[in-house]
Amino acid sequence: MLMNTTRLTLLIALTFSLACLPRTGAQAAAPPEDPAHQELRALRDGLLAAINRGDLAGIEPFLHTNCVVTWHNAEVSRGHAGVRAYFDRVMKGPNKLVDSFKCDITVDELTILYGGDTGVCWGGTDERFVLTGGKPLNIKGRWSATLVKENGRWLIASLHASTNLFDNVLLNLAERAAVLAGVACLATGLILGWRVGRRRKAGV
């Protein structure tokens, strides 16, 4: 009888211990996601849709009125007026640089939230330009942003875009252009030298 009682006690103790262990894998209950992340996804999707439509008026509602944007060329725009001036110069008018622009982004991880009204996020970009004159230009870049919640809405307070300095499409194009220019100069020099040589032989 004593043995059976001991076994029962051990069984109860083991069961209690197993029940108290933290669950892992599929059994672990995931912590509830902060509702802010769904709001931020809506901001991302709305902003991207406006960008890919080329709709500057549709972009501005996602930007804080005092936003700071650093572009790929290291130029900085401040506020809605600054962003609008940059777009107008680069994509409109007689001296525009870009005919059209499309962009897809990836997010490395969930936005880091601070105090419920500030967030920092970052990730990668796949940007597709058509330059003035029709030349396509594809860039893989990186981005980071600071977001603030104001009057119940998330807005972009700062945005920074960059590309790899050591693997840059524009640098590659410049290097190719330099090589082509060098080849053209070499060919021109050879042709001129050949013609001068012929004239000398002919006594001209």
Image: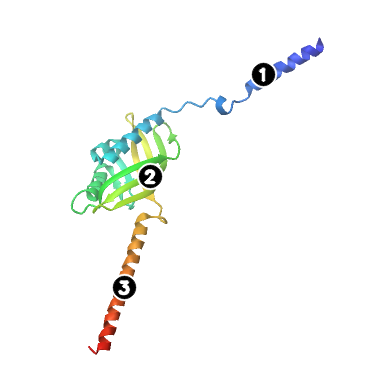
Horizontal arrangement in the rendering, residue 8 relative to residue 19 (left or right): right
The residue that disc 2 covers is 125
**Which numbered disc, 1 or 2, marks the residue closer to the eye?**
2
Quadrant containing the N terminus in the rendered view: top right
Which residue is located at x 32 percent, y 45 percent?
A: 69
Q: Residues within 10 Å of mark 1 (few under 14, many from 20)?
A: few
Which residue is located at x 59 percent, y 25 percent?
A: 23
The residue that disc 3 covers is 187
**Hey, what amino acid is under mark 3?**
Ala
Give the camera-side residue of 172 and 112: 172
Q: Earlier in the sequence, mark 3 or mark 1?
A: 1
Give the camera-side residue of 31 and 80: 31
**Percent x, y of residue 155:** 33, 35
- Vertical position of residue 23 compared to residue 161: above or below: above
Horizontal arrangement in the rendering, residue 25 relative to residue 199 (left or right): right
Q: Where is residue 102, by image quadrant?
A: top left
**Hey, what amino acid is under mark 2?**
Thr
Q: Residues within 10 Å of mark 3 (few under 14, many from 20)?
A: few
- Vertical position of residue 24 compared to residue 137: above or below: above
Q: Residues within 10 Å of mark 2 (few under 14, many from 20)?
A: some
For marks 1 and 2, give the CA distance: 51 Å
**Percent x, y of residue 160:** 36, 46
Q: Earlier in the sequence, mark 1 or mark 2?
A: 1
**Percent x, y of residue 188:** 29, 74
SS at badge 1: helix
For marks 3 and 1, give the CA distance: 87 Å
**Which numbered disc, 3 or 2, marks the residue closer to the eye?**
3
**Percent x, y of residue 65:** 28, 39
The residue that disc 1 covers is 16
